[in-house]
Amino acid sequence: MSDIILLAQNFLALFVESAPWLLLGLLVAGIMHELVPVTFLEKHMGSASFGSISKAAIIGAPLPLCSCGVIPAALGLRRSGASKSSTISFLVSTPETGVDSVSVSYALLGPLYAIVRPIAAIFSAIYAGLMVRFFAEPDSHINKKDQVDRSQSSCCSSKVTPEPVAKTSCCASEHSHDHDGADMTSQTDNVQSSKVTKVFAYASGKLLEDIVVWLLIGLALAAAIKTWVPTDFLTQWGDGIIAMLVMALIGIPMYICATASTPLAVGFLAAGLSPGAVLVFLMAGPATNVSTMGMIKQEMGARTLVLYLFSVISASIGFGYALNYLVSSFSLASMIKTDSHVHEHGANVQVIYALCALLLAGLMLRLGFKKLKNYRQTQTQQSACCG
């Protein structure tokens, strides 16, 4: 019974910790979906070129989105025209590092990790994007054809629309100039208000509905790992390839952001893990989780998911070995902290996190009630039709 209570407490703590970042990710996704032109995304991230993959990695690296917040943001990018490879690159670099995690890394782990983490995140993201580009994007020519078809249809429609404007007389424009100016201002305000409404409607509606199941599954699994997998289990494997594989396999399903993974890394360093093995956890843990894997399989297919996981594991282990080599060869151990103390959020920050958790739970409950209502209406209609 005590384990169940501890599991529930860990689940609640993870839910509260991830709530503000998930809401931020939903908001970013809503803004990108409604306000960022599709042509902009197609220009910078729409192709599977090396330039688009690199831009996605660099754009995502400084964003303060964790492994939960990046899911809706990446989903919004993909549905707005980004290629598979660019989306994967964004999915890897964004949660692995950020402005917040770099500062926390410097404070808790030392300057070496603050330098290595963003570099490793960007290059591992480019590597993952290239893997998807070469082995999982055979439909790129179809995407380009669809984009051409959409652009052609928009050109055709634009040829038809100027016709009513040409029929407007000069006299009419002179007499109604003031009224037209007022009407245009009113229409602009209405359009802006409509866009803001659509941003929140899409973020809290369709997008949240698409990820809520995997989100809850990922949080539950992370809570189970936190409850039943002791730290000693992670530190008993030494410092070689076995230790790095264990850290990667443990980190992959965990629902943890780059900032929250840093205090755990402090504990691993204090327990005797090598800097490279800790870096594997810092890369693989935030980079992916059960929720991210479910979204990738649903939106981009099983092959992309396999390549994504292979890229995350191989890149994290490769950078782990590279860090161990640098530390031993250039005597960089003094740039790593192993005695940092972890501080909890202040009272004001805890209130913000709690309010965000309540808001997120409310949005989820609203979706649940809406689905239940629609289900009941469907059953009623079916019974009336059959009767």
Image: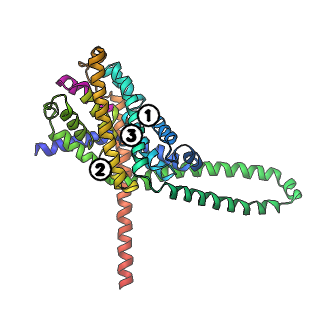
293 vs 19, nearest the viewer: 293
191 relative to 277 in the view: left or right: right
Q: Residue furthest left?
A: 1
How many angstroms separate mark 3 from mark 1 (CA)? 9 Å
Q: Which residues are magenta?
A: 259-275
Q: Label 2, secondary structure: give it.
A: helix
How many angstroms separate mark 2 from mark 1 (CA)? 25 Å
Q: Label 3, secondary structure: give it.
A: helix
Numbered label attached to residue 61? 1
Which class describes the residues within 10 Å of circle 1: few (<14), some (14-19), or many (20+)? many
Would you place residue 229 above or below residue 107 in this image? below
Q: Position of residue 319 (x, y in %)?
A: 32, 30
| Amino acid residing under circle 1 | Ala
Which class describes the residues within 10 Å of circle 2: few (<14), some (14-19), or many (20+)? some
Residue 266 falls within the magenta-colored stretch: yes
Would you place residue 344 above or below residue 46 in this image? above
Would you place residue 282 above or below residue 381 in this image? above
The residue pinned by badge 2 equals 216
Q: Residue furthest bottom?
A: 387
Q: Main secondary structure of the magenta part?
A: helix
Residue 189 falls within the magenta-colored stretch: no
Numbered label attached to residue 250? none
Q: Is residue 364 visible?
A: no
| Amino acid residing under circle 2 | Leu
Residue 346: quadrant of the picture: top left
70 relative to 321 in the view: left or right: right
Numbered label attached to residue 92? 3
Q: Position of residue 326 (x, y in %)?
A: 31, 21
Q: Position of residue 116 (x, y in %)?
A: 36, 25
**Comes first in the chain, label 2 or label 1:** 1
